[in-house]
Image: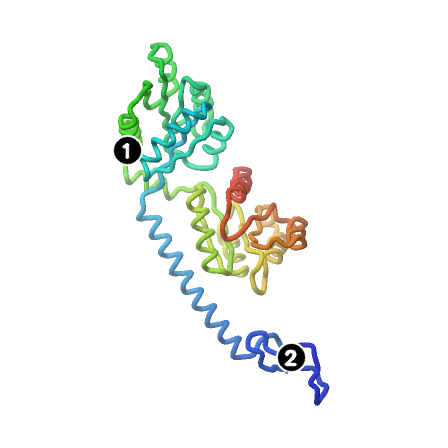
Amino acid sequence: MARNGAYDNKSRMPVRQCAGCGKIIESGLYCQACLEKFRERAKTQNRQMELLKNNSLRKVVQERREIVILIVINDERNLNLTKLILERSLPEYKILATSNTLNAINTLISREVNLVILDADYNGVDMLIRIREDDKFKDTPVMMMSGSTERELVANVFSFGVQDYVTKPCEPNTLVERINKLLQFDEEEAAETQSKVAFKILLIDDDIFDLRQERDTLKNRLPCEIVTSQSAVEGMKILENDSIDLILVSLDMPFVNGLKFLSLVNGNAKFKRIPAIIMTDSRDFKILSEIERSTAVGYIRKPNINEDGLALIETKLRRRR
């Protein structure tokens, strides 16, 4: 059978085949039967997506918020030991650790932290002062550890508003008990805090399974509300009716791909200032070069968004403050 663009051997007339089933058609890319199948599949995917979104929203309301503990000690040995103790004893909490002050500040800026643990023997007092001088996280609970019991030091750190002072060496069980005591909070207050998010991201991907994975990754890492869409048309409607801080759009979508969607966004004065990031699993140099020449502020791999991709998203969101 002749291919599209070829000629029939008898009539020498051009023939066209359906791209789905191979049946000879008069025009277009697909026969009527294939088009009906595609429409039914799209309806099924839309129903699944609506169910997924409803279940996700219900889960957010019902589940307890993630508790994040940030350890900042510039001595690697003590940092790793403290992190190991807390990870083993408090598996229900998210334990972050860094020896770098700048990384610690960036973490405090980009996500909600429920408790900061510092060590006065390793520049902890300097870090405490920096925390209390910044209006964004001056009220963040802080626990100070130190091998010193000097009255002047203790009085100094409490004057900066630490919630607890732990004298080293401290038994792991005692440390964990005091952390748990600090992290007790009212459930109604927690639910209210959970509903208040710093940013809103519009996530567009026609693949329902990729969309779910991408959304969960962002939700677990960033203090953001994730608004999802399976098409460029629906994405434009969301932009019209909602306040969006960042757009994440898949490159490979039918009818209107990610780059075409960006051109539509940039054509509207209300939206063109919103930063947009392209998501793609392609490694083709030509495709990546085309993305770099576009108005996108960058691109990330999909559906497994790695640390570099999350860092790019966090950077662009911080600039929206």
| Mark sitting earlier along the chain (1/2) | 2
- Label 2 crowding class (10 Å Cα cut-off): few <14, some 14-19, many 20+? many
Q: Which mark is residue 16?
A: 2
Q: Is residue 152 left or right of residue 34?
A: left
Q: Which residue: 61% across, 53% down?
A: 283
Quarter containing the N terminus: bottom right
Element type at marker 1?
A: loop
x, y percentage for residue 216?
A: 43, 50
Query: Is 269 situated above or below 8?
Result: above
Q: Relative to the observer, which residue lies in front, 126 or 192?
A: 126
Q: Which residue: 55% across, 38% down?
A: 319
The answer to which quarter of the image holds residue 138 is top left
- Label 1 crowding class (10 Å Cα cut-off): few <14, some 14-19, many 20+? few
The residue pinned by badge 1 equals 184
Q: Which mark is residue 97?
A: none
Q: Is residue 68 left or right of residue 280?
A: left
x, y percentage for residue 211?
A: 47, 56
Query: Is 106 situated above or below 192?
Result: above
x, y percentage for residue 233?
A: 54, 61
Residue at the outermost bottom position: 10
Element type at marker 2?
A: strand
x, y percentage for residue 108?
A: 45, 32
